[in-house]
Image (spheres, rainbow, N blue to C red):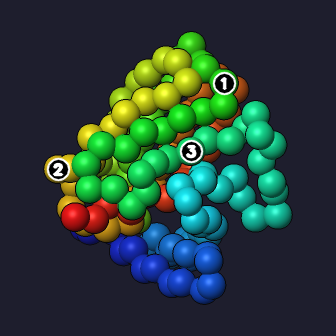
């Protein structure tokens, strides 16, 4: 049975509802990864996605290198469409095969978990 995914936009916030539950994804401009409502990341916690929007390769960079991190990209309905493991302060991901749309990027390492928005367009 397919899962239900409803999206609602209010200002700079994108609300998503999966099945009977719900969640909020707060977005920013310029490719910055948002860390939640009412919380400002320090410079050391910053993660950047660029170019955003993108039609091909995107770079995800962190302020400090990590020994092991995992990058996942999801559709707004929660389907994982790309995942990779990397080390260092940046990773490049090729999203050219993905359909145009808005995606959720999740970056997980031993010290952080960050979630942000990525726009794929031609």
- Which image quadrant: the C terminus? bottom left
- Residue 15 falls in which quadrant of the image? bottom right
| Crowd class of label 3 (few under 14; some 14 to 19; many from 20; radius 10 Å) | some
Judge depth for marks 1 and 2 and give the one in front: 1
Q: Where is residue 21 in the image (x, y as percent from the top left)?
A: 55, 71
Mark 1 or 2, nearer chain start: 1
- Say which residue label 2 marks: 97
Residue 48, which numbered label?
A: 3
- Say which residue label 1 marks: 64
Judge depth for marks 2 and 3 and give the one in front: 3
117 is higher (above) or lower (below) than 19: above
Question: Residue at 39% of width from left, 74% of height from top?
Answer: 5
Q: What element carries label 2?
A: loop
Can residue 44 be seen from the camera position used here? yes
Can residue 82 be seen from the camera position used here? no
Q: Residues under labels 1 and 3: Cα distance? A: 12 Å
- Which image quadrant: the N terminus? bottom left
| Crowd class of label 2 (few under 14; some 14 to 19; many from 20; radius 10 Å) | few
- Residue 110 falls in which quadrant of the image? top right
77 is higher (above) or lower (below) than 54: below
Q: Residues under labels 1 and 2: Cα distance? A: 29 Å
59 vs 8, nearest the viewer: 59
């Amino acid at each position: 049975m397919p899962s239900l995914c409803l999206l609602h936009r209010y200002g700079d916030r994108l609300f998503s509802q999966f099945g009977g539950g719900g969640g909020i994804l707060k977005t920013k401009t310029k490719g910055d990864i948002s860390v939640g409502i009412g919380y400002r990341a320090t410079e050391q916690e910053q993660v950047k996605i660029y170019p955003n929007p993108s039609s091909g390769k995107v770079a995800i960079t962190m302020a400090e290198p990590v020994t092991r991190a995992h990058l996942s990209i999801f559709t707004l309905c929660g389907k994982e469409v790309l995942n990779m493991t990397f080390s260092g302060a940046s990773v490049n991901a090729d999203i050219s095969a993905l359909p145009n749309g808005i995606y959720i990027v999740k970056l997980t390492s031993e010290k952080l978990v960050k979630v942000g928005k990525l726009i794929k367009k031609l």
